[in-house]
Each structure stands twice: as C-alpha cells, then as structure tokens.
Amino acid sequence: MTASDGVTLAVHRYTDIDAARPTILAIHGYPDNHHVWDGVAECLGGRYNFVAYDVRGAGESSAPAGRSGYRFGQLVDDLGAVIAHLGVDTVHLLGHDWGSIQGWAAVTDPALMPKVGSYTSISGPHLDYGGAFLRSPRRRAGWSTSPNRCWRPAISGCF
C-alpha cells in the first residue's frame, strides 16, 4: 500500500481477515522487519487476525527521501492508513522497540484512539515518561556510577 507521502508500506497478513475475529496489528522495532513477529503470528493466528507491516525504511517498505519522513505525525498517519487498508474498525496494537514508540504516539493521537482497542508495548517507553526518567536527578546520579558497577566485577579477575 502507499502512504500519504508516496512511501510504499509492505503489509503482511499472516491470516485472512475474518470480521468475526479480533485483529492484532504488530509494529516491529529497528533494525528488524515484520519477520520478528513470525513466531507470535504462528501462536496467535488460530484465534486472531494477525497482521504486521514493515515500517518505512525497513524490510520490503521503501524509505522516505529525507529525515522529515520519519516524524511522528507521518508515522502515526502510516499506522492509520494501514488500519484503513485492512478494512477493520479496531485493532489490538502490538509494538516492539521502535515500533512501541510509534505505537505510543499513535494511541495518544485523537484521530487513532477510537481505532485502537488495546495496546501492548514491548520494550518501548512512552516518550513523555522516558524523557522524564532520563532528566531526573536520581537517574543522572546513578548513570555516573554505572560504568564502575559494570566493569569492576568483569575485570577484577584480570589483576
């Protein structure tokens, strides 16, 4: 399918779309492609419609001409276009890594909220909370001592 800015998005249906079953739409992380979901699709495909797509610039999808093609507004638009392409009212969104971050942007977008029945984020923070954590004094204090905590045990046997 073609996104609003002309980028081609490769949508992979692991199952036929059956209106009687819920639809899971999976978004992979970076530098993966839709194949990261193959095992999950195999497990869940008997009970759910399972779909994944290669996000722009990955797998079988084309890349935008410039970095502006990766802005959250465009990524959210991509997700909405994929949902519309599937012809379903709502999806259960599943995101991993960079796909999770895109998912958080989508589920907080007023236009997509009604189209997402649930959201599962695997290893991808909501950017507001992730940013607050990285800016927190407690985090900065711990960060400065982390290298010592990691390397001391590893090199202690060398001396």
Image (cartoon, rainbow, N blue to C red):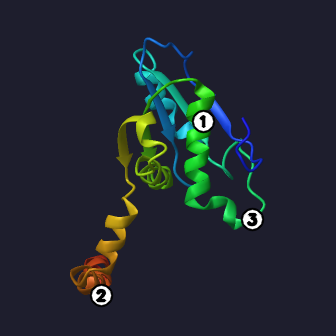
Amino acid type at mark 1:
Val
Amino acid type at mark 3:
Gly
In the image, what residue occupies the spot 49% across and 44% down?
A: 111
Q: Is residue 121 left or right of residue 109?
A: left
Spot occupied by residue 48 in the image (x, y as percentages of width and height):
43, 20
Q: Are marks 3 and 2 in contact (CB under 8 Å)?
A: no
In the image, what residue occupies the spot 60% across and 62% down?
A: 71
**Element under disc 1:** helix
Query: How far apart are labels 3 and 2 at the CA level?
Result: 36 Å
Amino acid type at mark 2:
Ser
Label 1, residues with CA under 10 Å away: few <14, some 14-19, many ≥20 = many
Mark 3 or 2: in front is 3
**Element under disc 3:** loop
Query: How far apart are labels 2 and 1 at the CA level?
Result: 43 Å
In the image, what residue occupies the spot 41% across and 23% down?
A: 43
Spot occupied by residue 64 in the image (x, y as percentages of width and height):
74, 56
Quadrant assignment for the C terminus: bottom left
**Which of the numbered marks, if any, corresponds to residue 144?**
2
Q: Is residue 148 left or right of residue 15?
A: left
**Element under disc 2:** helix
**Which of the numbered marks, if any, corresponds to residue 82?**
1
Dot 3 or dot 2, earlier in sequence: 3
Dot 1 or dot 3, earlier in sequence: 3
**Which of the numbered marks, if any, corresponds to residue 66?**
3
